[in-house]
Amino acid sequence: MRLLLVEDEPAIGSYIQEHFQDLGYSVIWVRTYEDALETAVVEEFDCIILDRRLPDQDGLELCRELRQQGNNTPVLVLTALSGVDQRVEGLHLGADDYLAKPFDMDELAARVQALIRRSSYRNQPNLTIRNITLNSMTRTVTIDQRQVALSNREFLLLEYLMRHADQALTRSQILEHVWEGQQASDTNIVDVYINYIRKKIDIDGQPSNIETVRGYGYRFRYED
């Protein structure tokens, strides 16, 4: 596995690089936005660990630029700015996860592993999470081999949630990707369709497949 580490603080960068190398990762460490963009464009990585406060640019600009170029490498942002507004801004610009400084190294490693795991199935036509299988080619959903009837919008919403399983998504993110500015301008419609889907895929007496992240949005559970 190859990681791109973008961190300007020598002590933190060295610590992260050594830890992941001990775990068997190949780590390329750069210290500026300019070097990070140049490296990310010409080389392939399984994940990018990105410090937001870089000496020559806001690290989130790297997310924005890569996403505009069609580069979907998972990005985990390290930042001392851990408020909800900052996290939402980062997610809108293409970050996949956030971790506030100071952080626990084991948690960082676990989050990176989760991002890599999720990215491995984002582009697969068949998605299976627990007992739910979604086929984007035939546009069908089955639960325990029983087909579930979904409207086109319900299917698009479920597919988006499953392709970002275990990732907390804001209502605005969901609206932007599933409705694409059409038909809806109010995020309340996201809540309505989440309820539609829950009624069709959840089992009475068991936790919902789609978790409500209070004050934030929703997350599709990857594991029980």
Image (cartoon, rainbow, N blue to C red):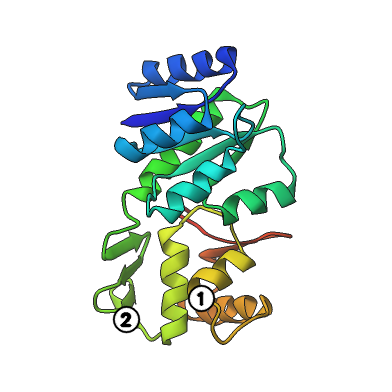
* Residue 171 percent coordinates (x, y): 63, 67
Q: Quadrant of residue 126?
A: bottom left
* Residue 107 percent coordinates (x, y): 55, 31
Residue type beneath disc 2: Gln
Q: Looking at the image, tell me whether mark 1 or mark 2 is earlier in sequence order.
A: 2
From the viewer's perspective, is residue 20 above or below residue 93?
A: above
Marking on residue 111: none
Give the mark toward the camera: 1 or 2.
Answer: 1
From the viewer's perspective, is residue 40 above or below residue 13?
A: below
Q: Quadrant of residue 70?
A: bottom left
From the image, tell me which residue sits under label 1: 180
Q: Nearer the viewer, residue 221 or 160?
A: 160
* Residue 172 percent coordinates (x, y): 62, 67
Crowd around label 1: few <14 · some 14–19 · many ≥20 (10 Å) = few
- Given contact means CB atoms under 8 Å apart, are the residues at marks 1 and 2 in contact? no
Element marked by disc 2 = strand
In the rendered structure, the answer to whether residue 155 lies left or right of residue 58 reads left
Residue appearing at x 52%, y 27% in the figure: 32
From the image, tell me which residue sits under label 2: 147
Residue appearing at x 56%, y 87% in the figure: 183
Residue type beneath disc 1: Glu
* Residue 84 percent coordinates (x, y): 73, 50
- Can I make out residue 207 in this image? no
Q: Nearer the viewer, residue 153 or 195?
A: 153
Distance, label 1 to label 2, CA atoms, is 27 Å
- Can I make out residue 112 in this image? yes
Residue appearing at x 54%, y 83% in the figure: 182
